[in-house]
Amino acid sequence: MKKIKYILHIDMDAFFASIEQRDNPNYRNKPICVGSSPSSRGVVSTCSYEARRYGIHSAMPSSIAKSLCPEAIFIKPRIRYYSQISKQIFSLLGKFSPEVFQVSIDEAYIDITGMVPYYKDYTTIGKMIKEDIKRKFDLTCSIGIAPCKMLAKIASDLKKPDGFVFISKENVEEFIESLDIKKIPGIGKKTIEKLNKYGIYKMRDFYSKDIGFLKEKFGNWVESLYFKTFLKENNLKNESKSHSISTESTFDHDIEINETLIEYIRQMVWELSLRLTDKDLKAKGIGVKVRDSNFKTYQKQKSFSQYSINVFDFEDEVVKLFKKLCEMKLKKEKIRLIGVKFFDIVKTEDILFNKNNKEEILLKKINEINKKYNSSIIKKGFR
Ligand code: TTP
Ligand code: MG
């Protein structure tokens, strides 16, 4: 029989906003939004819990956030600074287990299965991590511990902010049965509505139905939930891989399709390529996203036959995709948002017969120089 694992999921509370409140006493206990200015057309990256009481949330247009809470303070993000703090926090976690897998700027899974001999019990490990982070960074986090990844993630979210939830193997069944179906990651709003239509609100309602009925109404994906295969999905490493990276920009005014925009897209590809090289990753797919002045969004993507980091090929291909999208979909519309994505990403070390091409060497050098001077002193020039 497979040994039961214990997985800890940690997620920082209102991460960017909490750092700003920590650093500036004038922001404490106040509704603050980190993100674009309300006079722009950008969005809120995150907001303090005080701002959440007004209904503000991540990805909401800043202008709407302002109308919900006119006294909210808007702060420009300091991403580089938040990333440095993130690095320091996650390196501290290494003290508690050798298996720490960061999955985003403020979130990680830690396999704590074998760590009990060094601490009193699993709860003690969770509490010590929270105390350490509070003492060293003056920030709060929420932690969930459970015998599988999915439940650990759900648990860390249940009592946010400053939450701590431990689900022991003895309590797993009861926990799952009483779980609200809305808490299951990956189930969208429409599906929730449909589940509700059939009287399914809690997981126990879901399990009371016949699997044949559920598959017919919702599709084959229900099987893993029904047979609880998620309880065995504890391979942290697989999930820690980023499968795609992307960047996007909303313009202050809708803009025409012209050569300056094309250069801007090339710049975006360049920046993504630098991020990829910095993490020693390669991609096999590229994509572009465009939103027009009528808020219609179009996407196009392409896969290559080999993993690569050839920034010049990527640039040309992304521009080709963009031009095709414009021809096929946009006609004479102006552009409101543009996004570029790399997907199907792997670690360079995982690629058999990997060859370093000269573009990769060039990007690595640029990254080294930019890091040395702690800025982007080398940027892409215009053609
Ligand atoms: P989250 O952990 O999703 O949010 P949070 O830490 O702000 O709040 P919570 O207490 O609910 O965990 O994201 C971490 C950071 O990532 C967040 O502080 C800002 C950034 N972020 C964005 O920039 N845009 C987004 O749409 C989201 C969701 C997050
Ligand atoms: Mg968070």
Image: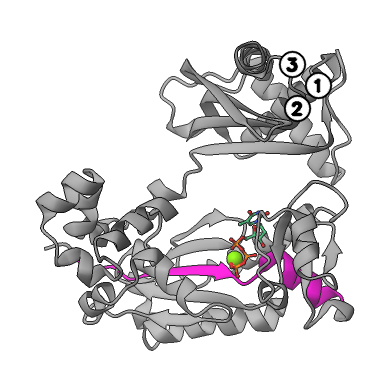
**Inter-mark Cα distance, 3 to 1:** 15 Å
Q: Earlier in the sequence, mark 1 or mark 2?
A: 1
- Contact, mark 1 vs mark 2 (Cβ under 8 Å): yes
Amino acid type of the residue tagged 2 in the rendering:
Ile
Query: Residue 20 colored magenta?
Result: yes
Closer-to-camera residue (356/237) = 237
At 80% from the left edge and 70% from the top edge, which residue is drawn? 20
* Quadrant assignment, res 110: bottom left
Q: How many marks?
A: 3
| Image location (x, y in percent) of residue 297 | 61, 31
At 35% from the left edge and 52% from the top edge, which residue is drawn? 191
Query: Residue 182 colored magenta?
Result: no
Q: Earlier in the sequence, mark 3 or mark 1?
A: 1
- Contact, mark 3 vs mark 1 (Cβ under 8 Å): no
* Quadrant assignment, res 49: bottom right
| Image location (x, y in percent) of residue 327 | 65, 10
Disc 3 or disc 2, which is closer to the eye?
3
For label 3, the residue is: 332
Amino acid type of the residue tagged 3 in the rendering:
Lys
For label 2, the residue is: 335
For label 1, the residue is: 261
Q: Cβ(mark 2) to ligand 1 < 8 Å?
A: no
**Inter-mark Cα distance, 3 to 2:** 10 Å
Disc 2 packing (10 Å; few <14; some 14–19; many ≥20): many
Q: Is residue 15 above or below residue 242?
A: below
Q: Is residue 354 left or right of residue 45?
A: left
The quadrant of the image that shows the C terminus is: top right
Q: Is residue 138 left or right of residue 355?
A: right
